[in-house]
């Protein structure tokens, strides 16, 4: 058995086809006839254009516009004077043969991209490699891509380029495995879109299997079993069939509006931490974003994100959601979430300490930047602002007044702010649940944060393994608080969502539906299953 990185969910059983790496020898010879060498290069570039435009068409059909855009950018590289222009110059100035010219320009570009700090930019080196390889093979008159003849093929390669991946024929290829790559590489992203199970980062898979070997690919655990016994094959056939059946069933629900048996329309939304997460949420048929944990914008960096940066992130999500509700939660830092550049006091109980709205109301300098960014973004969609860790009406009123202040400030600067947007609170402290009927008179909505609500109600630290047996979402005290919150809000005509893990918990959903919860928000991968349960 071999363990790698699970890059695309699902199970497959099939026979190995190893992608041969074309060993291209780059000749060092200098050339005499500059014009005919430039002609060779230009023909190879023309051919690459034709090939890429076909791949782009296929990608558009199989994966949609966003993924097809990768090949658009490949085609643009072909026209980029800094890239292909430099190849011509290499022939002109150094009398390099066409292969050598392409190779040396590609190497320079690769060196630049691969040494970049940013992981995303480093991954883009794969695009440069992909395009240059295509040009090289075209110049040499060799075939580009993976040719698969038989059904039930598991493609095994050192690495798959994005164009290799896009060209995979789903009727024949049931999975792919690579030595290198990570979850964010293009080929991994495309595998998920194509819904082909994949395990990447296996180090030496190309030398651990032979053409024709039978392999089991477990894209959920990131496991590969080579030449399994009969019993194991049977076991995985069962897993594969169950997985496929469930997936098919659930897909039917992407466009379906969720309505309960007694006719109530319920919203099923997604939780996100980064703006890009919005795509997965949409693909899974969400009605909106129920929680954007903005603290992730503040993490893994050395300084606070600026107003402009935050504005761009919020605007991006609002625009992508095209008018669907987007609940953005203000900074919830403290407790288990710390920022390296913001020193916090030493506390005995950080979860009961200086965090979330408490910190923001104390550090208006930090809060102002975020509220201004949110207000400026408000004109680009259906924004709802939510404050975390509210324990009293005073706290909410202070936060609301501060929003008003920032709004006036922006308008005085001539900046546009939406006329109407909702202001709500997380109900995650028992005090807020108990006082829900009072709070509901002032807020526009509640979202129940069960992750914290449970730990505070049962005095059981959500991070502690030792007391995890006490951490029970279905404890009657927790259920009563949830019911009080929903009833309190409904009495005032306000809506209630839930964005803690409990909202996607299959055992809790029936009870929450019965209590009349209006919105369920969860990670993208749980959405379709939750829709199904709510409708049942
Ligand atoms: C919660 O407490 O339930 C919640 C959604 O917020 P977080 O998990 O970010 O504390
Ligand atoms: Mg919380």
Image (spheres, rainbow, N blue to C red):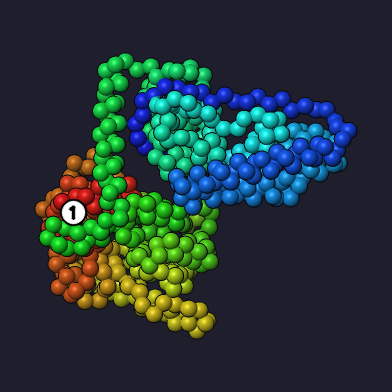
Question: In terms of depth relative to the viewer, which is nearer, 212 or 420?
Answer: 212
Place of residue 522 in the rendered image (x, y in percent of width and height, measured from the top left): 30, 53
Q: Say which quarter of the image contains residue 487.
A: bottom left
Q: Residue at x 66, y 40 (%)?
A: 47
Q: Residue at x 65, y 41 (%)?
A: 48
Q: Residue at x 35, y 69 (%)?
A: 384
- Is 528 drawn above or below residue 394 in the view shown? above
Write down the residue under mark 1: 535
Relative to 114, is 364 on the left or the right? left
Q: Say which quarter of the image contains residue 433.
A: bottom left
Q: Say which quarter of the image contains residue 49.
A: top right
Q: Please give the count of numbered marks on the rendered protein.
A: 1
Place of residue 279 in the rendered image (x, y in percent of width and height, measured from the top left): 41, 53
- Is 462 drawn above or below residue 229 in the view shown? below
Within 10 angstroms of label 1, few (less than 14), some, or many (20 or more) residues?
Answer: some
Q: Residue at x 26, y 56 (%)?
A: 256
């Amino acid at each position: 058995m071999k363990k790698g990185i699970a890059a695309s969910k699902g199970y497959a059983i099939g026979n190995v086809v190893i992608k041969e790496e074309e060993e291209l020898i780059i000749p060092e010879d200098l050339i005499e006839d500059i014009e005919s060498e430039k002609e060779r290069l230009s023909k190879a570039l023309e051919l690459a254009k034709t090939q890429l435009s076909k791949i782009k068409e296929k990608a558009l059909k199989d994966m949609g516009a966003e993924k097809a855009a990768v090949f658009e950018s490949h085609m643009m590289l072909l026209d980029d004077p800094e890239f292909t222009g430099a190849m011509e110059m290499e022939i002109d100035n150094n009398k390099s043969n066409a292969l050598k010219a392409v190779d040396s320009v590609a190497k320079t570009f690769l060196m630049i991209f691969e040494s970049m700090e940013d992981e995303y930019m480093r991954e883009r080196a794969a695009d440069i490699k992909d395009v240059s390889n295509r040009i090289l093979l075209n110049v040499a008159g060799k075939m580009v891509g993976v040719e698969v003849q038989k059904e039930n093929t598991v493609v095994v390669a050192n690495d798959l380029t994005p164009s290799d991946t896009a060209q995979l024929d789903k009727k024949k290829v049931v999975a792919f495995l690579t030595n290198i790559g990570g979850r964010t590489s293009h080929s991994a992203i495309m595998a998920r879109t194509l819904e082909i199970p994949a395990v990447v980062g296996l180090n030496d898979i190309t030398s651990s299997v032979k053409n024709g070997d039978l392999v089991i690919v477990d894209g959920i655990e990131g496991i590969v079993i080579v030449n399994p016994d009969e019993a194991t094959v049977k076991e995985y056939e069962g897993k594969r069939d169950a997985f496929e059946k469930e997936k098919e069933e659930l897909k039917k629900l992407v466009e379906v509006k969720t309505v309960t048996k007694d006719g109530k329309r319920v919203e099923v939304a997604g939780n996100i931490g980064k703006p890009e997460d919005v795509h997965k949420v949409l693909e899974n048929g969400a009605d909106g974003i129920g929680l954007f944990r903005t603290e992730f914008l503040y993490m893994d960096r050395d300084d606070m994100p600026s107003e402009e940066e935050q504005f761009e992130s919020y605007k991006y999500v609002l625009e992508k959601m095209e008018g669907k509700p987007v609940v953005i939660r203000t900074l919830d830092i403290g407790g288990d979430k710390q920022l390296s550049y913001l020193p916090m006091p030493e506390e005995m109980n950080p979860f009961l300490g200086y965090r979330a709205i408490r910190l923001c109301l104390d550090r208006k300098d930090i809060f102002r930047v975020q509220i201004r960014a949110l207000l400026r973004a408000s004109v680009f969609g259906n924004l709802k602002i939510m404050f975390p860790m509210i324990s009293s009406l005073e706290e909410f009123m202070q936060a609301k007044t501060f929003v008003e202040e920032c709004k006036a400030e922006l308008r005085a600067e001539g900046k546009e702010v939406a006329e109407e947007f909702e202001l709500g609170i997380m109900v995650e402290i028992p005090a807020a649940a108990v006082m829900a009927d009072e709070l509901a008179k002032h807020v526009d909505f509640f979202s129940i944060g069960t992750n914290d609500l449970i730990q505070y109600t049962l005095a059981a630290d959500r991070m502690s393994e030792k007391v995890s047996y006490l951490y029970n979402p279905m404890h009657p005290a927790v259920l009563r608080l949830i019911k009080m919150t929903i009833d309190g809000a409904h009495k005032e005509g306000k809506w209630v969502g839930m964005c803690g893990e409990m909202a996607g918990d299959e055992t809790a959903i029936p009870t929450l539906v019965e209590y009349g919860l209006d919105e369920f928000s969860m990670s993208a991968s749980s959405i379709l299953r939750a829709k199904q349960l709510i409708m049942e």
